[in-house]
Image (cartoon, rainbow, N blue to C red):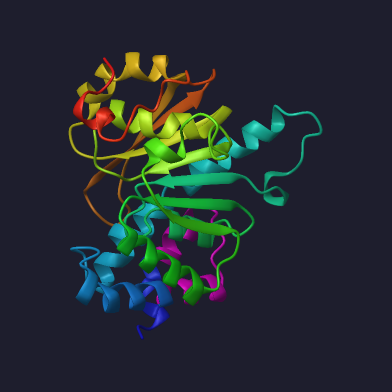
């Protein structure tokens, strides 16, 4: 088991961004790190296996959107009748293409009162994620193996119900929008983690996002804490219902993105 002291950068990032990480939360990150390294030997969950790299590239990167989520959630509650402090209210969040549980699991540690759904198409990954949930003793979080094209289709209980959808999945923005926007309620937000040269791709996806009921309201650019690597967040607000024809059948969004 790795000593909590190895996560000083995680603690520093949290403190700098008004994210509450106490001893219990840090122990959960320690448990998650150890389990990821152990299970990765047989499951090939990630290419990042050094604890210091896991700390930055998985843990810090995952929770780097937490201040943004706090800001948006506070704004959403303020716009509702009977405004309440966002710290006392729990939102709902879905992580599409969670893989080995990122960014969903670290964000769940940060937001214990929120309700989370973690989605991935590979059952072996979800089996690991569920084991991690149990090992950390997390509650109000469900991990499901399935294709979002099925889970988000009209009539499904998960369609247009979430306050937030996040994804670190590497895919075209138009494709991610078709996966994510059908799951988000009107007034909610999709937050796409982006890196590298993404601006032209995002610009080309604006029509698809509009068709799906969304609108890009902001793009925030920063550096991944402790590195020179760029990390950006494309913020899409759901402004109207997604047409029933979306998402299309499995495989169609990636093969033929909306233009």
- Quadrant location of the C terminus in the rendered image: top left
Residue 70: where, in percent of width, then height? 57, 43
Q: Quick check: 3 left or right of 82?
A: left
Q: Measuring 57% from the left and 61% from the top, which residue is drawn there?
A: 20
Residue farthest bottom in this picture: 1
Residue 238: where, in percent of width, then height? 51, 24
Does residue 100 lie above or below 219 as drawn?
below
Residue farthest right in this picture: 82
Q: Is residue 22 magenta?
A: yes
- Quadrant location of the N terminus in the rendered image: bottom left
Res 78 → quadrant: top right
Q: Quick check: 208 left or right of 254?
A: right
Q: Is residue 251 magenta?
A: no
Q: What span is colored magenta in the figure?
A: 10-30
Foreground residue among 162 and 234: 162
Residue 46: where, in percent of width, then height? 23, 63
Does residue 213 lie above or below 105 as drawn?
above
Does residue 83 lie above or below 56 as drawn?
above
Res 85 → quadrant: top right
Q: Measuring 64% from the left and 38% from the top, which residue is drawn there?
A: 74
Does residue 21 lie above or below 104 as drawn?
below
Residue 42: where, in percent of width, then height? 21, 75
What secondary structure characterizes most of the magenta part?
A: helix
Foreground residue among 129 and 223: 129
Total number of numbered discs in the rendering:
0
């Amino acid at each position: 088991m790795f000593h909590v002291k190895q996560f000083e950068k995680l603690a520093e990032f949290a403190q700098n961004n008004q994210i509450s990480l106490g001893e219990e939360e840090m122990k959960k990150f320690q448990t998650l790190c150890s389990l990821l390294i152990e299970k990765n030997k047989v499951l090939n969950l990630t290419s990042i296996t050094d604890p210091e790299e896991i700390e930055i590239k998985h843990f810090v990167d995952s929770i780097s959107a937490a201040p943004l989520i706090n800001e948006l959630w506070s704004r959403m509650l303020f716009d509702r009748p009977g405004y309440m402090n966002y710290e006392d209210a729990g939102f709902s969040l879905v992580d599409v293409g969670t893989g080995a549980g990122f960014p969903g699991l670290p964000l769940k540690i940060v937001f214990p009162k929120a309700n989370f759904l973690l989605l991935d198409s590979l059952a072996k990954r979800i089996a690991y994620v569920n084991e991690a949930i149990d090992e950390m003793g997390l509650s109000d979080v469900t991990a499901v193996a399935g294709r979002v094209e099925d889970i988000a289709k009209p009539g499904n209980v998960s369609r247009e119900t979430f306050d937030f959808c996040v994804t670190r999945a590497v895919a075209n923005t138009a494709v991610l929008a078709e996966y994510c926007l059908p799951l988000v309620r009107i007034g909610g937000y999709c937050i796409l983690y982006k890196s590298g040269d993404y601006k032209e791709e995002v610009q080309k996806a604006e029509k698809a996002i509009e068709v799906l009921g969304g609108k890009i309201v902001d793009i925030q650019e920063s550096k991944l804490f402790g590195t020179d690597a760029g990390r950006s967040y494309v913020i899409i607000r759901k402004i109207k219902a997604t047409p029933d024809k979306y998402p299309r059948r499995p495989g169609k969004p990636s093969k033929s993105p909306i233009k």
